[in-house]
Image (cartoon, rainbow, N blue to C red):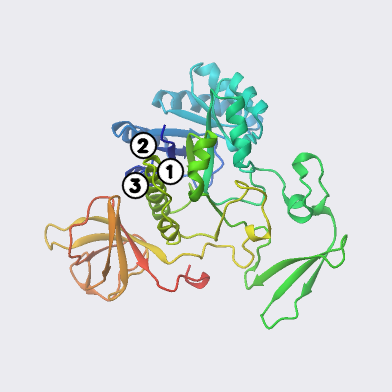
Amino acid sequence: MKPELLMPGGSLEKLKYAFEYGADAVYVGVPLFSLRARENEMTFEDLREGIEYARARGKQVYVTANIFARNLKLKSFRENFKKWVDLKPDAFIMSDPGLMMIAKDIDPNVNIHLSVQANCMNWQAVKFWQQQGVTRVILSRELRIEEIKEIRNKVPDIEIEAFVHGSICIAYSGRCLLSHYMSHRDANQGVCDNSCRYGYNIHKAESDKDQEYFLEDLRNKGEFYRIDEDDNGTYIMNAKDLCVIEHLKELREAGVCSFKVEGRTKSLYYASMVAKIYRQAIDDMDAGKDFNPELLTELQKIPNRGYHKAFALGGTSHESQEYRHSTSRNFNQRFAGVVLDRSDKTGRVRVEARHRIRPEDEIEVISPSGGAKYTVGKIFNEQGEQVHQAGGGGLIFEFDLPHEVGPHSLISLCEKGGFNDKQL
């Protein structure tokens, strides 16, 4: 069976584009009850429309309500859950056993997927959650592929979901990793070395580089951890982004039925491009084709902190961290606009600009079915006046593009040398 491609939907617009660019399913958070409460644009009416949009296309929508709730949220959750159930989403992603009890009390047949926040790491835990009525387990990111395979062998009659792409933090599934990082002693296995409680010295390196520093652990004199610092500080806990697109076949063979991408707070461009690239990788795999390395090149067009494979093939190392920058910078194209339509009056393509575009800029027009590069010619504002640039911020401009542009097309600005942190 072909694995599901599960994409984030941080807004109704992102949900629609994720589907158009190849997602089989989208997960959306609900305000106050998901772990993206502050940056959640999904209203109740948006959720209703998103589910209807998915239904019309044979797609799935999973509602994320994965907080660990305090007492004051229990009543509100019960009241809201009744309304969500009536919309008939395909599943709820949850982690709090108490909230699961409320959900089952309201609808005994509700489909619950166990959130990665529940830190499920072994087959016995999977079996436990299965007995509680969970139909799918989203496994912890710390697991290696061979561990996932053992879970599938021990509990063959439950769905397994795993993250394959996106940002991850120093506490990968909500647990401290400092001890593991600094002394290879896993706090989550009972051998914490209390790295957070000891003293450290900062040493400036003897180097031609500006502001290059190292952290010395006072328990182990002479042992240093690199700390690169710029005007914004240092990024010792800044993990590179997860990317295991080359290993989807191994994950499928290990029993993973759903490949999940992180990014509900990422841009529309991110949701669309990652969906398109992983869609191609999954389809190629299903057709028996070898992995196409050009897909990795395509992923470099998308803002990222550098890619690594996390725990999938073994342990992590210092190479898993990005020490110099906190923001995404390893990319060579920038999201610049959304194509709206073609003007009946002028025949020009109308674009909602998300970043500055100027004449002579090289752009790529990307659609769900392909893409083509162009050099920007004349630009006009909505009044039909020629202007020297299309400013960002959602203003609408018109461009002369030589070919027909399909629905849900996006515009990216190309930069041969890549973008640096000052351009972000």
Q: Look at the picture and state if 194 lies above or below 63.
A: below
What residue is shown with label 3?
Answer: 21
Query: What is the number of the mark on residue 50?
Result: 2
Task: Indicate the quadrant where residue 324 lies.
Answer: bottom right
| Real-space CA distance between mark 3 and mark 2, rounded to the nearest whole angstrom | 15 Å
Amino acid type for the residue under numbered disc 1: Gly
| Mark 3 / mark 2, whichever is N-terminal | 3
| Mark 1 / mark 2, whichever is N-terminal | 1
Q: Are marks 1 and 2 in contact (CB under 8 Å)?
A: yes
What residue is shown with label 1?
Answer: 9
Q: Look at the picture and state if 53 lies above or below 237.
A: above
Amino acid type for the residue under numbered disc 2: Gly
Task: Determine the secondary structure under disc 3.
Answer: loop
Q: Where in the figure is residue 339, as x and y percent of width and height?
A: 27, 57
Q: Residue furthest bottom?
A: 208
Please identify, in this view, whether the residue under mark 3 or under mark 2 is nearer the observer.
Answer: 3
**Which residue sits at x=58%, y=52%?**
309
Mark 2, Cα crowd under 10 Å, few <14 / some 14-19 / many 20+, is many
| Real-space CA distance between mark 1 and mark 3, rounded to the nearest whole angstrom | 13 Å
Please identify, in this view, whether the residue under mark 1 or under mark 3 is nearer the observer.
Answer: 3
Judge left or right: residue 311 versus residue 359.
Answer: right
Amino acid type for the residue under numbered disc 3: Tyr
